[in-house]
Image (spheres, rainbow, N blue to C red):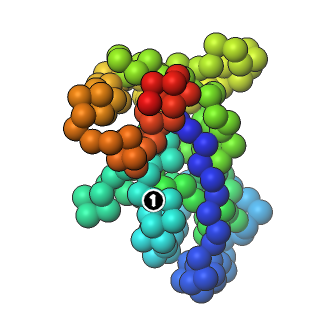
Amino acid sequence: MIHVAPQPEPASFDGNVRRRGLAWLDRNNIPLNRSLQKGTVLEPYWRDCLDDLYSLYSGTCAYLAIFFERVTGAGSTDHFVAKSKRVDLAYEWANFRLACTRMNSRKACHDDILDPFEIETGWFRLELVSGRIFPDPGALPALRDTIQSTIDRLGLDDRDHREMRARHYQEYREGWYPSEFLCRRSPFVWAEAVRQNLL
């Protein structure tokens, strides 16, 4: 994972998502100051801003830090603070993260995951040849534990993700594409290669 810079709320968001969502909550007598009752399904107006989310965040998953094509249908709107816990944030742009569907599913309503908006450069380290991801060894113990819990919860260090990151770097090393394309395709791999003076 790498730092994700928050992008400004689109001009259409208030009318297309927030106001419609709040009106729906009001019509259904769902209070904003309580956790969502189990089994309650909210109207997914956040889907109406997915194109904006994808565009403004350059098609990059906030958790996996790779580019994905919108046409694949792999993108989703993740509520960083779960809507089941904070219904008042269910229709708020600042609570949305662009995520591939696998990462969104793994994150679910768990709150032991670092916010991509708050991550600092170098917290997550990468062994480029193997694709292994691990916490910054120099981080304070509490932060290292939180980084590791994020890696574990999202499965960022599983075999498939290791292989993908290693392949992205290897393809760059073999001259398949320039560093600018690596930056676009696999920003975390690119950032780690830069940090390690390998570009």
Q: Position of residue 105 (x, y in %)?
A: 42, 45
Q: Position of residue 32 (x, y in %)?
A: 73, 67
**Residue at the image point whose x is 45% and y is 59% from the top:** 58
Q: Amino acid at mark 1?
A: Ser
Residue found at x 57% / y 59%: 96
**In the drawing, does residue 66 fall left or right of residue 72?**
right
**Residue 117 or residue 48, whichever sits in front:** 117
Quarter of image, res 114: top right
Residue 98 versus residue 131 in the image, above or below: below
Q: Residues within 10 Å of mark 1 (few under 14, many from 20)?
A: some
Residue at the spot x=70%, y=14% of the render? 138
Residue 73 appears in the figure: no
The number of numbered badges drawn on the structure is 1
Q: Nearer the viewer, residue 39 or 152?
A: 152
Circle 1 SS class: loop
**Left or right of 119 on screen, residue 192:** left
Query: In the figure, 22 relative to 63: above or below?
Result: below
Pick the quarter of the image with the C terminus: top left
38 relative position to 155: left or right: right
Residue 37: image location, x then y, percent: 61, 58
User: In this figure, which residue is indicated by the disc labeled 1?
Assistant: 58
Vertical placement of residue 143 versus 21, above or below: above
Q: Residue at x 66, y 19 (%)?
A: 144
Q: Position of residue 30 (x, y in %)?
A: 66, 71
With 195 as the anchor, is 87 left or right in this view?
right
Q: Is residue 134 visible?
A: yes
